[in-house]
Structures are given as C-alpha cells and as structure tokens.
Image (spheres, rainbow, N blue to C red):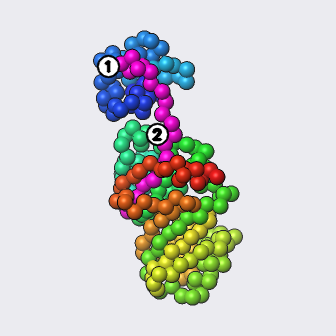
Amino acid sequence: MRLDQFVAQCSSLSRKDAKRAIAAGRVRVNHQVCKQAKHQLTGTDETQLDSQLLTAPGELYLMMNKPAGVISATTDSDQPTALDLLPGEIAARVHIAGRLDKDTTGLLLLTSDGQWSHRVTSPRRDCPKSYRVTLAEAVTEDALRALEQGVLLKGESAPTRPATVTRYSDTDIELVINEGRYHQVKRMLAAVGNHVLALHRNSIGQIILDDDLAPGQFRHLSENEIRSITE
C-alpha cells in the first residue's frame, strides 16, 4: 500500500493532508523520515506520524441508500458511481457487496471484508432480499401465483426459486427473493407479462435500510447487523 494512503486510513488526515505531512517530514517508516508519498509499505513496516505509531484500522461495513442514476461500480469515467458518494479515504478501502442496477434505488452494502461480502452474494447462502416494485400494469392473481411458485426466465433452463409476494395495490408489490440472478426482479415480472417502472431494495437478510438515510447518504453497520450475515 502507498504510504499516503496508509497514513490517511490510519489517521484523521485526508489523502491530500497526508501527502503534505509526508512532504513536511512528519512521517517515519521504520524510524526513518520518509518524504515519498508513493513509497510502498510492506506488512512488517512500522509507520509513525508525529512520533505516534499508526496501526491499520479494522474492517469497514457500510449501508448506503443508493439513488437512481448512480452505478454500482468502483470507478467509471462517464457516470457517477456509488463510491463517488463516499469520502475518498473510505472509498479507497471498500467494495460493493451485491450490486444494484443504475435505475434501482435503496439498500447497498459496502465493505472491506472480502469473506463477509462473499457471504452476502454467494448463491449457496440463503440470504433473502426484499424489493418494493412499482409495475406498469395491474398484477394478476395468476402472476402472483407464478411468482410464488417460481418462473422460467428468458434464456435460462431452470426456474427461479419460489418468491414471497405482498400486494399493496394493483401496481405496487413487495417481492422477496433468495437468489441474485442478473436483473432478476425485472426479468421475473417480464416473465409474467408485466414491466417494472421503479425498483427499490429494502433489505438484505436481516439488514434493513435505515429510514433516516436520504438518497446518497450512508452509515456504518451496527455489530448486530454485521453479525447477522456471518451467523
């Protein structure tokens, strides 16, 4: 890891301020002043800022209320990404656990913990995901029964797992699925002759999107929320 990145992650300094501190001789690596921000640290190097030992921070676990028009990617030269909504020192450490389409809103999980992320996304793990769906046309009883039994998606040979459906109105439903196939919710509704106008993810497993988070805002997960994925 670059020295300036490590200093920013392990202190209250921004990446820019970390570079200034390094240039000013405030940072020592193995007790020697190092003024090269791009210096690559090894796992055994000892780094100090103003004579205070810096230690690597723990893993990060975040939830974000993803707004529409933002893509679930680390970087993109043409479009805003979810990581663009985070402070730089946090964005440099995390990745997305379970992506959302550009026009889909709601719960997005981000973490620096690869094993935890795998538990969220693994098809072998039963991790239900809840979506609020706005439809173009009134949903029929036949369509509801088909969704609850499992439907065959275009281009696939095996039907989806049975879903749980709650109807709030003719064009407003909640759909809970236990898979993560490509564009699954939209394709499931297309398979029963309907079209999704708006899609919002409410929950993943026991982690529920915080009502206090405005679109684009994020917060750290609680210990109970983190543990709910690993148990």
Q: Is residue 212 above or below residue 142?
A: above
Tag 2: amino acid = Arg
Q: Of the residues under marks 2 and 1, which one precedes in the sequence?
A: 1
State whether residue 110 appears in this view.
no
Tag 1: amino acid = Ala
Q: Nearer the viewer, residue 226 or 121?
A: 226
Q: In the displayed structure, does residue 99 sit left or right of residue 228?
A: left
Q: Position of residue 188 (x, y in %)?
A: 57, 74
Q: Position of residue 201 (x, y in %)?
A: 48, 65
Q: Position of residue 219 (x, y in %)?
A: 41, 50
Q: Spatial distance from mark 2 to mark 1, Cα to Cα?
A: 23 Å
The residue under the point 45% across, 84% down is: 169
Q: Which residues are magenta?
A: 48-69
Q: Is residue 227 above or below residue 104?
A: above
Q: Position of residue 149 (x, y in %)?
A: 66, 78
The residue that mark 2 highlights is: 93
The residue that mark 1 highlights is: 23
Classed neighbour count for the residue bearing mark 2: other residues with Cα under 10 Å, few (<14), some (14–19), many (≥20): some
**Mark 2 element type:** loop
Quarter of the rendering containing residue 210: bottom left
Classed neighbour count for the residue bearing mark 1: other residues with Cα under 10 Å, few (<14), some (14–19), many (≥20): some
Q: Is residue 54 magenta?
A: yes
Please identify the residue farthest to the bottom as the structure is shown: 141
Q: Nearer the viewer, residue 177 or 136?
A: 177
Q: In the displayed structure, does residue 151 sit left or right of residue 98?
A: right
**Which labelled disc corresponds to residue 82?**
none
Quarter of the rendering containing residue 200: bottom left
The residue under the point 45% across, 69% down is: 199
Q: In the displayed structure, does residue 79 sit left or right of residue 227?
A: left
State whether residue 125 appears in this view.
yes
Q: Nearer the viewer, residue 16 or 74?
A: 16
Q: Is residue 58 magenta?
A: yes
